Amino acid sequence: MIVDRLDAVRLAASTGPLADLLADTVDAGASVGFLAPLHRAAAQRWWEERAADVAAGRLALWAAYDGDRVLGTVSLAFPDKANSRHRAELVKLMVHRDTRGRGLGRRLLGVAEDAAAAAGITLLHLDTETGSPAEHLYRSAGWTAIGAIPDYAANPGGELRPTTIYYKQVPAGALTR
């Protein structure tokens, strides 16, 4: 399995396999911003819309490939405000349900944390559905929960669920793994 950072060209060439991963993630019940069922065309359009942010450097995106199949992704979203250039948001850490439990989520998390440190980012933050399996990953990787917001987002089934906010301080230039 190969984990690569995607530029806008590679993203454009991978929107189909990325759409398959996103649809699978939503169908498996993960709260990543979409309601079920997520049709492949809508998932593909969502990925296509990310290309401008990737090209502009506002979004860094990595994908884990097994051949042409995308098994996981993680992204860092960079703020556009001058007073927040030291931080980034970890977004869309997804692992195909057939691959979960084999360390890919941890590997992708480490890739994003290492890239953040190399870029001089010293603070990462994220939100995840409270009580989701992702919480175990983040806590075990040294992320700190700062609280939960009730009824923050609907899960894929449409039920309002709380989200927990996490942060992690990353020493600039230091590898996290």
Image (cartoon, grey):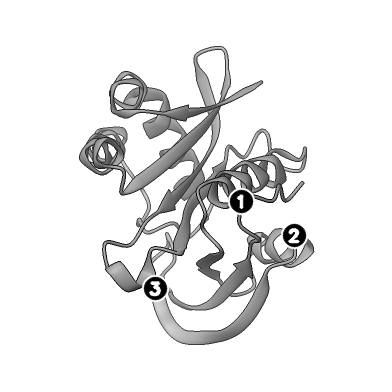
Q: Position of residue 98 (x, y in %)?
A: 65, 33
Q: Amino acid at mark 3?
A: Ala
Q: Amino acid at mark 1?
A: Glu
**In the rendered image, the vertical position of residue 88 relative to residue 57, given as above or below:** below
Label 3 SS: strand
Label 3 packing within 10 angstroms: few (<14), some (14-19), many (20+): some
Label 1 SS: helix
Of badges 2 and 1, nearer the viewer stands 1
Q: Position of residue 140 (x, y in %)?
A: 78, 62
* Residue at mark 3 to residue at mark 1: CA–CA distance: 25 Å
**In the rendered image, the vertical position of residue 90 relative to residue 130, given as above or below:** above
Is 96 left or right of 59, judged from the image as shown?
right
Q: Quadrant of the N terminus?
A: top right
Residue in view at x 54 percent, y 70 percent: 129
Residue in view at x 52 percent, y 68 percent: 125
Q: Which residue is mark 1?
A: 113
Q: Which residue is mark 3?
A: 153
Q: Position of residue 133 (x, y in %)?
A: 68, 61
The label number, if any, that marks residue 141 in the structure image: 2
